[in-house]
C-alpha cells in the first residue's frame, strides 16, 4: 500500500514545524491533499508526490545522478510505488534502484529521521510518449549518510552517470542552503 494521504499530511506537518516559512511554497501540495485522488500516484494530475534521497558520504559530498529522462544532474529519486509504505521508503528504494546502494548501507541524517531535509515543488514537462500532461512534482527530499563506502552501480535504463559534489555545488538551491546550515 503506497504512502497514505494521512502519512503525507503528517510528514508535511512535521516539516513545517521545522520550516514554517515554507508553508506558502507548498500550496500545490495542500491542494493535492484536499483532493480525493491519491497524492502519491504518478497518475494523479496536475500534481503528485515524489521522493528523493540526499545522500552524503564521509567526505561531506552529495551524490548526484544524471537522469536520462530530464538530462539533469539530480539526487536519486522518483515516483512512489505500491510497495512503499512511507515516503522515506520510496526515497530509499529509488536510491537502491538507481545507484545500487542498499538501504542497509545508509542511515538517516541525525535530526532528519522522520522529517525530510527539503520539500520542493517543480514543473515537469508534458511527456506524450507516456500520455502525461505537464504537471508538478512535490518532491520530499530525505537526507541520509552513507554508513560505509559502497560502490555505485547505476541503473543504465534511467541513469547516465553520477558525481559526488560539495555542499556548495549541490544542484538544488534549497538543498544547497540547508546543507550549508549543517557545517
Image (cartoon, rainbow, N blue to C red):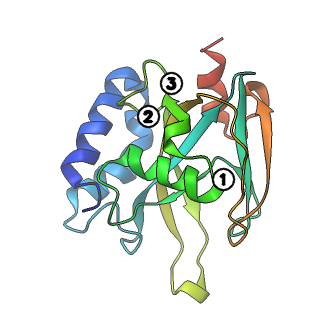
Q: Do the residues labelled 1 and 3 touch (CB within 8 Å)?
A: no
Q: Is residue 35 visible?
A: yes
Query: Residue 71: x percent and y percent?
Result: 77, 63
Where residue 119 sits in the image (x, y, percent)?
47, 40
Q: Distance between the residues labelled 2 and 1?
A: 20 Å
Question: Badge 3, how many Cα within 10 Å: few under 14, some, many 20+?
Answer: some
Judged from the image, the secondary structure of the residue bearing numbered disc 2 is loop
Question: Is disc 1 surrounded by few (<14), some (14 to 19) or many (20+) residues within 10 Å?
Answer: many
Pick whichever of labels 1 and 3 is earlier in the sequence. 1
User: Which residue bears the numbered disc 1?
Assistant: 99
Checking the image for residue 109, the label placed there is 3
Q: Nearer the viewer, mark 2 or mark 1?
A: 1
Residue 111 in the image: state x and y as whole percent. Answer: 42, 18
Image vertical order of residue 150 relative to residue 160, above or below: above
Quarter of the image for the C terminus: give it: top right
How many badges with numbers are in the image?
3
Amino acid at each position: 500500500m503506497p504512502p497514505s494521504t494521512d502519512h503525507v499530511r503528517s510528514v508535511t506537518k512535521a516539516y513545517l514545524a521545522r520550516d514554517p516559512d515554507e508553508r506558502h511554497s507548498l500550496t500545490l501540495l495542500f491542494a493535492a491533499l484536499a483532493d480525493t485522488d491519491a497524492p502519491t500516484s504518478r497518475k494523479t494530475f496536475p500534481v503528485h508526490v515524489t521522493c528523493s534521497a540526499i545522500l552524503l558520504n564521509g567526505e561531506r559530498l552529495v551524490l548526484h545522478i544524471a537522469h536520462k529522462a530530464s538530462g539533469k544532474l539530480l539526487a536519486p529519486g522518483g515516483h512512489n510505488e505500491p510497495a512503499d509504505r512511507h515516503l522515506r521508503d520510496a526515497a530509499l528504494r529509488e536510491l537502491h534502484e538507481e545507484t545500487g546502494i542498499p538501504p542497509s548501507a545508509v542511515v538517516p541524517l541525525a535530526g532528519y529521521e522522520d522529517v525530510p531535509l527539503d520539500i520542493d515543488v517543480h514543473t515537469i514537462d508534458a511527456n506524450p510518449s507516456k500520455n502525461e500532461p505537464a504537471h508538478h512534482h512535490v518532491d520530499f527530499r530525505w537526507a541520509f549518510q552513507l554508513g560505509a563506502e559502497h560502490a555505485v552501480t547505476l541503473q543504465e535504463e534511467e541513469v547516465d552517470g553520477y558525481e559526488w559534489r560539495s555542499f556548495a555545488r549541490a544542484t538544488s538551491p534549497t538543498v544547497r542552503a540547508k546543507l550549508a546550515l549543517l557545517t
